[in-house]
Amino acid sequence: MSCPDCFRGGVSKSHPTGSEVTIHGVKTYVARPEAGVTPKGIIVFITDAFGWDFVNNRVLCDHYAKGGFLVYCPDFMNGRAMSPAVLPVFDTLLEKSSWFTTIFVKPFAFLLALYYVIPWILTCSPAKTEAGVIKYFKALRTSPPPSSVQTQDLKIGAAGFCWGGKHTIELAKDDPTHRVTRHSSQTLSSVPEPLIDAAFVAHPTYIKVPDDIDSIKIPISWSVGEEDMQMKGPDIQKMKAILESKKDAEHDIQIIPGAKHGFAIRTHPEDKEEMAAAKRAEEQAVSWFSRCFS
């Protein structure tokens, strides 16, 4: 399940520079590398609860694109993403406060939180959205790639945050029933292949330890805060031990000191420690995909 930290945080003061298009029938924010740079591959950015049009998600897509990638951020929630209006509501609920706020303000904030969260949980659970995610990735694999991308041996990665982390880990399990034969322009092989070549997750939700971790087969990089409310210390250590014992999946694990759930995407711009932790996760993802796509 989602935790309260899934719905709290700050809003970026930067401005997205990408464009909105429809790709394989899904509204998608597209961030491109600088002019003249041939993308190393495609990263599909699977967002947190706040969806494809949340400014923080778009700005981070732009940052990834500067690393030399074509970045797609699809609307996998079909227009039902969580409203950013809930962010200050959860900040109010979770912050230490005076007795007046606790008695008179927080009850109202709690009811307001339920107003936003319950409809989102009912319509956007991973079980209800997984089919759309799989369909999108299958379409990427079986279609001619964009003209700007090197076609042969096209690399596709998934980067998932909070809610999107669950979907990314499902993709990283490489379910044999999801494998497809690439479009002929992507490869000379006719053998069915996994939907992604590499995965990155930051503070994923809905994760079952050890079951989900045991099933991972695709190279994965994992960034998690030391003080994550969703995946607590013992589970972090179990996850780390399982991935380190695997011989069939390359991995990279970063445990960020002092960071809380959501640190990679929903930072408060005025908080230098939060911004530093988010930057560390960003650099981890860009480095990982550069390595896996080389």
Image (cartoon, rainbow, N blue to C red):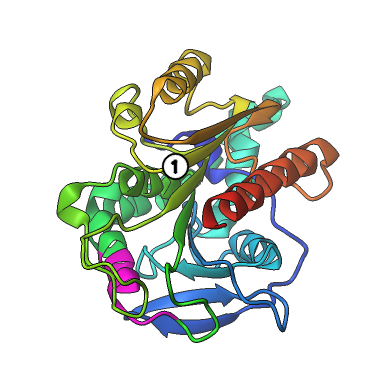
Residue 225 x/y as whole percent:
61, 29
First to last magenta residue range: 135-145
Is 51 inside the magenta-drawn segment? no
> Is the N terminus in the top left, top right, bottom left or bottom right quadrant?
top left
- Relative placement, left or right, of 29 versus 130 is right
Residue 15 x/y as whole percent:
73, 71
Does the image show residue 50?
A: yes
Q: Specify the quadrant of the image occupied by residue 68.
A: bottom right
Relative to 116, residue 220 above or below: above
- Relative placement, left or right, of 104 versus 80 is right
- Relative placement, left or right, of 252 versus 155 is right
Label 1 neighbour load within 10 Å: few <14, some 14-19, many 20+: many
Q: Specify the quadrant of the image occupied by residue 92.
A: top right
**Judging from the image, what secondary structure is the residue with disc 1 in?**
loop
Name which residue lies at 71% across and 83% down: 36
Task: Quickly name the residue at label 1.
Answer: 219
Residue at the outermost top position = 234
- Relative placement, left or right, of 141 versus 222 is left
Name which residue lies at 81% across and 36% down: 273
Residue 138 x/y as whole percent:
27, 67
How many marks do you count on the picture?
1
Name which residue lies at 31% across and 27% down: 214
Relative to 208, residue 76 above or below: below
Residue 293 x/y as whole percent:
53, 57
